[in-house]
Image (spheres, rainbow, N blue to C red):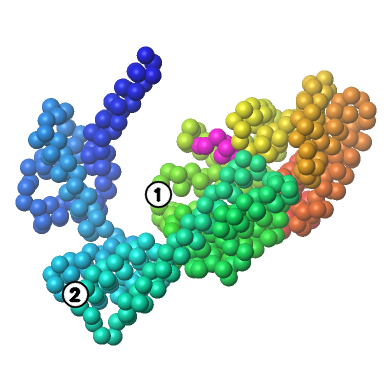
Amino acid sequence: MLLLILAIQKKLDNKMAKKNLLESLIHSLNPSELKRFALYTKTYTSNKSYLDLFKAIKNNVHKSQKYDNKYAQKKRYLYRIILESLILKDKKTIKNEVLFLIKSANYLINKQMPDHAYQQVNKALALVTKHEMTGYHLEIIEIEKQIRVCMNPKGYRSDEEILQEEVYLIEQQKQLQSLKAVYNHILNYKKKYGYIDYKRWDELYTEILEMGFPNLEDDCINNRAIYYYNYNQCLLSWIKHSHKEAYKYTTKLIQMDPAPLNNLERLNAYLEHSSSCFCLGRTHEIIQTLNQVEDMYQKGAFGRYDSIALKIFYYRSNYELLSYVFMGDEKKLRYKLVEIEKGMEYWGDKIPFAMKMIVATGLKFGYLAVGDLKKMKKQINFLIDSKKSGLRQDAYEDGLVWNMIYYFIKDDIDFLEIQAERAYKHFSQNDVNQSIDSHFKVKISKLFWDYSRMRMDKKQFLNTFKEMLEEKMVFFDNNFSEIDYPFLLWVQSEISGKPLLDTAYEMSDKYLNK
């Protein structure tokens, strides 16, 4: 019965959503669009009876009516007229220009003016070739074929040349789809595991080669393929801690000619570059890159979708917050914490769970840096409780380590012993491949457990913790590891007896690539 009720409710909700399409479209119109609608209806349309309906909805004085066929037809007609007014005089973009040329060529063919149509085709071909718009390119070739049925103009390319280009474009599409499939496959690995060991990495690389991943960049047919090749190489480098390599690939991405790329591809290039910078401790470049992203977004470079704004919020929240901690900038850190809190409240359930986990890893360290242990513990609890989600095991394990640190700070030895034993058993069970990260977590949790059982004093514990960190960080690019550096800042502040942010400021010259 419950399932039946839910199904009926879903149908009703869908019906309501369809009924509200016209209202939501009208209320979304800005002054410029309203002006275009007014001019269009004045110039091109004869039936003005729908304008009363438009005004009523716009002014919120529209009363619901019996939904008969005549009324439904009026609403559909008004909806279409609004879209026509917006589209026919839409802002000039490459895509809109190509669509205009395609429509012009088809119109001229119908008027039996093939010479004129060919001019439009050639203009369109120049644009789609430059911007690598393969789908439109193939559509334009079909129009070109129609023209050649009507005429065989001299000075234009032959049927054989057109056929060769079609084959080439289909190969482009095939390679690009393979590269996009590889991208999604690697991204799913990253979301599920975070960093992975070399054995799993080799298995992943074998899988993507079988999916059609090119061996060399030179094997890529066009620039968009090169984009996805370098993007995939960046992700492959990231998940095995090869951050210098990842930085090399993301630098290529942001230096590419943006013409063939869509808005999301351009955005992802900058955001991924900020990740590469973060993993190398390039704090100033992180902030500079993300400020550039925000500036481009405000100017409309990436569109105005909520998903885009949320993604930028996520990257800026995590990387800028940790950068301010790493640099020891308390003023900017406190401002960022407030900004993130407001953003989390604003976005609410729209934030994907995995994204919330990563933001929590940054927040708990930011709260520790300003001395707010209560908020720090709340974020740690969220990370530990996230285990059942099956996402980002690295974030869950980060929560386990910081949970031990929290009880160490609180000097709650009894509870520290319980948590350390729990963490030690978890890390031991997951240390199957003896990777650097997993083995380190086993040793650290064992160290906390030994300390909680009075097998060493506080000074010995802290010095041993620091030695373990420094030994591990030697294996990484520039002796820096973004996941371990927060631990190093904390343990050094405990050893020196100085506030964490003062310690971070003193250590920044040695460890950061500012």
Say which residue label 1 marks.
304
Q: Could you tell me which quadrant the C terminus lies in?
A: bottom right
Residue 316 location (% of width, % of height): 56, 47
Residue 266 location (% of width, % of height): 49, 58
Label 1, secondary structure: give it. loop
Residue 236 falls in image quadrant: bottom right
Q: Is residue 355 magenta?
A: yes
Query: Overall secondary structure of the magenta stretch?
Result: helix
Say which residue label 2 marks.
150
The front one of 45 and 153 is 153
The front one of 287 and 479 is 479
Q: Is residue 277 magenta?
A: no
On screen, residue 46 versus residue 210, left or right, reads left
Q: Residue at x 24, y 55 (%)?
A: 87
Q: Which residues are magenta?
A: 351-359
Residue 377 falls in image quadrant: top right
Q: Residue at x 22, y 50 (%)?
A: 83
The total number of labels drawn is 2
The front one of 116 and 213 is 213
Residue 296 location (% of width, % of height): 46, 57
- Identify the amino acid type marked 1: Arg
